Image (cartoon, helix red, strand yellow):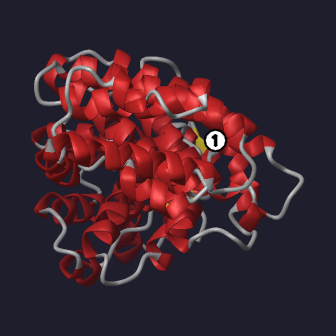
Amino acid sequence: MGDNATLVAFVKSVNDAFTYQDGPALSKLFVFNDHTLSVFQNRIHISDDLDSYVSYISSPIQLQITLTYLNYVRDRQSVTCEETHKQLCRLAELFTSLLTNAQGPWLIPTIRSMAVALCLSAQRVAKQTDDASAFTQSATRLLQLLIVILSDSTTPIASSKRVGALVVAGLLLRISLRTSAAPGAYAGKALEAKSLVSLPGFPQRDRITYSYWLGRYYLVCYYIDAARKQLEYAFSKCPSWHYHNKRAILRHLVAANMLRGQLPSNELLEKYDMEPVYYDLAACFKQGNLHLFQQNLVDNMEFFRSQGNFLLLLERTKLLIYRNALRKVALLNTNAERTNVLQYRDVLRAFQLTSQNFEMDILEMESILASLISQKMVLGYLFHHHQVVNLSH
């Protein structure tokens, strides 16, 4: 009888929160993190016959939300992770329908927690089943949710549904990077939230989180300068006591800056206890040692793949490292002969050594030089017939 009374009290509290549009109370009732759910399960025995407990909730959509949530809590330990994820997707669909006709931001605190749980659930399914379809399902629900949130554009942000735009858009960017579709297929709507970042009314944590995922999205799309801007904002605004968050941001910021030829200092890497491979990569990059740089990447492939930066660093740093190797040749030549004219044979030998590709010929080497000059990574002129390159100061 005590368990039934507790369940009845819970449903009554949910009904009151819906009736009086009490957002904070509703977010305390609908919880989604594992620890709190375990406490909830221990306190309330949820029977198989839930219909009789929720039947007096007058609104059909609110009744379905409550019933779906209680089923989710009751079954989460006894059904597969795929089934649990489907229940969360259904709950997201129901909340989206409710939000469509709701006024103001009172549902946003609950939707925030549910949206985070949806992303984590998709990750759990993908990890346990190697099936990425859960990411697509979550992205679809988040996209529908974001469309409804952004549609409330006639009232000030603080009193509108748009107060939840950045957190949902950030999660949509996060999940879109894991779907089998092209990132832009789901991220297009999330990019519309960019114009909201500078407006008042949003929690700072939402601005930081959105900028972080936007930076990662830009990095995947090879918009390097845009990625650096977003990641630098997230890193600088993230409070110092969120050490692990700043460390996570820094991993991607280092990659973005490296693609523009900027390396982190050892002091910065030490401050955030970065993985040793970052020290090795920075040293190889600076030395112009392409072979060792790529070997370090390959040796840590799983780590960089988990970060989404493996191919980016493997392919997009080649020219920059060749540039650094060329600078070393130019420096040695200037010291020895006091001229900026380099013989092709000297450059070829340097490129062969840095890449450990001893089959590289003059034409391939000249192609690399032409790319460096055309992309303005170095200033100079090629003289093919004379087999020399004249570098400007």
Residue 102 lies in quadrant: top right
Q: Residue drawn at (36%, 33%), measured in percent from left and top? A: 69
Q: Position of residue 351 (x, y in %)?
A: 31, 43
**Residue 52 relative to residue 197: left or right:** left
- Residue 58 placed where, x, y %? 59, 32
Q: How many marks?
A: 1
Instruction: Single out the residue that lies furthest toward the front.
Output: 1
| Residue at (20, 33) in percent of width and height | 46
Decide if residue 364 is in sight here: no
Q: Residue at x 30, y 83 (%)?
A: 241
Which amino acid is tagged 1? Ala
Secondary structure under the numbered disc 1 in the rendered image: helix
Q: Nearer the viewer, residue 228 or 172?
A: 172
Rendered position, 167 above or below 73: below
Q: Quadrant of residue 80?
A: top left
Q: Is residue 249 visible?
A: yes
Query: Does residue 65 appear left or right of residue 354 in this picture?
Result: right
- The x and y percentages for residue 376 are 63, 53
- Foreground residue, 23 or 338? 23
Q: Quadrant of the N terminus?
A: top left
The x and y percentages for residue 145 are 61, 35
- Residue 105's place in the image compared with 300, above or below, is below
Q: Quickly name the residue at label 1.
A: 190
Q: Residue at x 37, y 63 (%)?
A: 249
* Residue that lies at the very extreme toward the right in this rendered image: 154
